[in-house]
Image (cartoon, coloured by chain):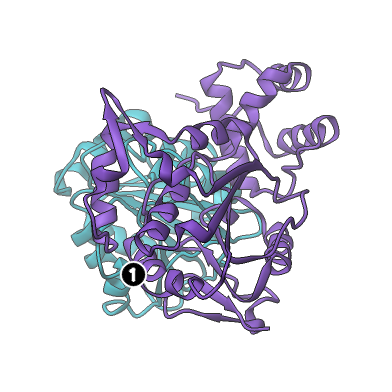
Amino acid sequence: MEENEMRRVDLVVIGGSAGSFTVLLEILPKIRTDIDFAIVVVLHRKNNFTTSIADVFDQKCALPVLECEDKDRIEKGKIYFAPADYHLLIEKDSCFSLDYSEKVNFSRPAIDITFKNAADVYQSKLVGILLSGANADGAEGLAYIKQKSGTTIVQDPESAEIATMPNEALKLCKPDFIANVGEIADLINQF
Amino acid sequence: MRIYTLVDDDDLETLLNDVANKYGYDFTEYSKASMKRRVNRLCTLDKFASFAELRYRVLNNDSYFARFVEEVTVNVTEMFRDQHFYKTLRDEIIPQLGVHSHIKIWLAGCSTGEEAYSLSILLHEANLAHKAIIYATDINPRVLETARNGIYPIHLIRGYSQNYINSGGITDFSDYYTANYDYARFVDKLREHMIFATHNLVSDSSFNEFQLILCRNVLIYFDKNLQDKVFNLFDASLENLGYLALGSKETIKFSHLERRYQQIGKEKIWRKMK
C-alpha cells in the first residue's frame, strides 16, 4: 500500500505478549505527538505488578499514556493500556467497557477479543498490529481486522524475540505489512 | 479463512427486545459490545447455524432461556480478589460497621458466592458476624444455588488462600472449609448470616437500607445510562455514612452521586456523606 492510499485511521490497536514489552518501549516513545487517532495496547502480563504499566510508559512517552477504566471515553492523541486481568471492549459510542469473563486463549486480557470487537466498530478505520509472543492469541483477531478492511501489520518473525504469535497470524492472513520494530513506528507515524 | 459472527448489531437488538417482551428480563441497556460477544460465544458453544435458530430456541424453550441468562451474564468471580481492596475492607471499613447494633450488607451481583464467603470470613475475624446479615443477590437463580452450597473446586483454593493471606488474613485458611476429593466446602458458620435471593438490578427496587453495599465487576456489563439508574438504586438503599464498594476499574465519577460521596483513599470505596 502506497502512502497516498493510506486510509483515514481512527484507532490503532496493538497486541503483544512475551517479548513485546521492550518492543513497545522502542515504538511508543517515537510516535509523533499530533496523531489524529488513539492507540490501544493489549499486552499479556502477570497481574501482580505493583506499579501500573501505563505509568511506566507515561514517563517515557510524549503522548499521555493511561490505563483504561470502565466507560472511559477514547480520545485521540492518547495511548491506552488494557488493565491487567480484564478483557477490553470498545462500544460504538467510543468508550471502553471492561469484561471479567473467562480467559480466552489462556489470556485475560485476550488480544483476539479486543481486535475482533474493534474491527466491528471501526472497520476500515482500524489498524491492527501484532507483536512478539509465545501463543496464538491475536492471530484470528488480526485476520478478522483484515476481513473488515482494516490495515494489518505483523512484526517480522525474524525480529521478534518469540516468533510464535507473528507466525500464527501469518498462517491465517496475509497482512498489509510485515515490519521490524523501527518500521512499525514509522508506519504508525504515517497514518 | 473467513471468520463469521452469526449475530450482528441489528440481530442483537431484535433478540434483546424479544427477550424483554417475552420473559421480562431487560438486557437492552447492557453493554452492547459485551452482549454481542456473549451471544456470539453462546452460538459457537451450542452450535447454532443461524441467528433465526438461536432466536427460535431462546423464545420457545424456557429451560434453554435459563441457560441463555446464565451464559450471557458473566459469572466469573473469586475469593478475596484485589488484595488492597480486601485489606482496606478489613482494616478500615468493617471496624466502622461494628458501631451499629445490626450490620446489614448488600452484595449485589454475588454470582456463585465467593465474595459472600470472603465477607463472612472478615466479619467472623472482626467478631461481628453474630450481629451481621449479608444479603447476597443475583439475577440468576442457578448461580445462587452454587452460592448457597459454598462448594468450590479444590484447585482454586490455593489461589484463594494466597489472596486471603495477601489481604491480611490472620488464621489458617483451611479452618474455613472441609476438603473432599476435588471440592472444598465452606463451613456452616460462614453461611449462617447470609440470605440469598434473586434480585434484578435493572427492574427490581430497593428492599432495605444498608451500611455497606458491594457491587464489584457488575456495572462494567451495563451501559452508562443503566449504571446511573443502578447508582440511584444504591443511593436509595444506603444509610447516611454508609459505604459503596465497586470493582477496581469502576467509578461513581461523572455520576450525580459524586458530589455527595467521599472516596476512601485510592480504593474504589465511597462513603455517603448526606
Which residue is located at x 75 percent, y 18 percent?
A: B56
Q: Nearer the viewer, residue B242 or A135?
A: B242
Which residue is located at x 70 percent, y 60 percent?
A: B230
Residue A40: image x %, image y %?
43, 60
On screen, B34 above or below A77?
A: above
On screen, B256 above or below A106?
A: below
Horizontal side of residue A92 vs B3, given as left or right: right
Q: Nearer the viewer, residue B173 or B189?
A: B189
Q: Quadrant of the C terminus of chain B?
A: bottom right
Whether residue B3 is visible: yes
Residue A3: image x %, image y %?
43, 58
Q: Chain of mark 1?
A: A
Query: Image quadrant of residue B22?
Result: top right
Which residue is located at x 77 percent, y 54 percent?
A: B205
Badge 1 amino acid: Ala
Which residue is located at x 44 percent, y 63 percent?
A: B128
Query: Image quadrant of residue B5?
Result: top right
Q: Quadrant of the N terminus of chain B?
A: top left
Whether residue B77 is visible: no
Residue B247: image x %, image y %?
48, 60
Q: Nearer the viewer, residue A172 or B150?
A: B150
Q: Secondary structure at mark 1?
A: helix
Horizontal side of residue B260 vs A51, given as left or right: right
On screen, B64 above or below A64?
A: above
Q: Which chain is cyan?
A: A
Residue identifier under label 1: A54
Residue at the limit of the structure toward the right, as seen here: B21
Residue B99: image x %, image y %?
51, 75
Horizontal side of residue A158 vs A64, given as left or right: left
Query: Image quadrant of residue B59?
Result: top right
Badge 1 local density, few (<14 within 10 Å), some, or many (20+)?
some
Q: Colour of chain B?
A: purple
